[in-house]
Image (spheres, rainbow, N blue to C red):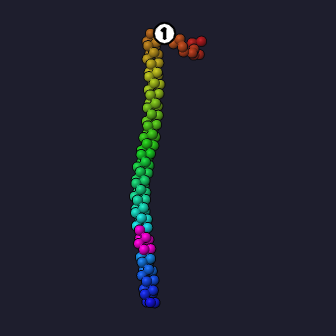
Amino acid sequence: MRPKIVFIVLVAFVAASGWQWFELQQKLDDAELQLSRMESHARELEKRVFELEKQLAEAEKRSVDGIAENANKMLLESWESVLQEFQQRLEDAKEKMRDGKPDINAEPTDDQT
């Protein structure tokens, strides 16, 4: 009878060990699946972050370029306005010199006093 009890205990032990191994294997498979999903999600997030950083860099570049371009345009327009005003005053002065009229707005010089 003792060999039967030892055999039954041994079978029970092997069955319990097999069951524990089966459960452990299931948990390991579930953990690997979850890890795989998390790695895939992390790669997607990294791609998204890379795309957003790229978009941000382009937006900053365009913004700086836009600011510089607008500043250059305003500077050119200002110089153009100054040059047009200067040209107009030169033409007015030439006309007055041709007509022999003194400039009323001009301040008197030592020769005229």
Q: Quadrant of the C terminus?
A: top right
Question: Image quadrant of residue 56?
Answer: top left
The three-letter code of the residue at mark 1 reads Lys
Q: Residue at left 47%, top 10%?
A: 100
Front residue of 43/83: it is: 43
Q: Which residue is mark 1?
A: 101
Question: Image quadrant of residue 66?
Answer: top left
Front residue of 1/40: it is: 1
Q: Which residues are magenta?
A: 19-26
Q: Compared to 60, does 90 lie above or below?
A: above
Q: Residue at left 44%, top 22%?
A: 84
Residue farthest to the front, as pictured: 1
Q: Compared to 14, does 54 lie above or below?
A: above
Can residue 15 be seen from the camera position used here? yes
Question: Image quadrant of residue 76?
Answer: top left
Q: Residue at left 44%, top 76%?
A: 16
> Residue 70: x percent and y percent?
45, 33
Q: Secondary structure at mark 1?
A: loop
Can residue 90 be seen from the camera position used here? no
> Residue 104: x percent and y percent?
53, 11
Front residue of 93/22: it is: 22
Magenta segment includes 21: yes
Magenta segment includes 45: no
Numbered marks: total: 1
Residues packed near mark 1 inside 10 Å, few (<14), some (14 to 19) or many (20 plus): few
> Residue 64: x percent and y percent?
46, 40
Q: Residue at left 59%, top 16%?
A: 110
> Residue 63: x percent and y percent?
45, 39
Q: Quadrant of the N terminus?
A: bottom left
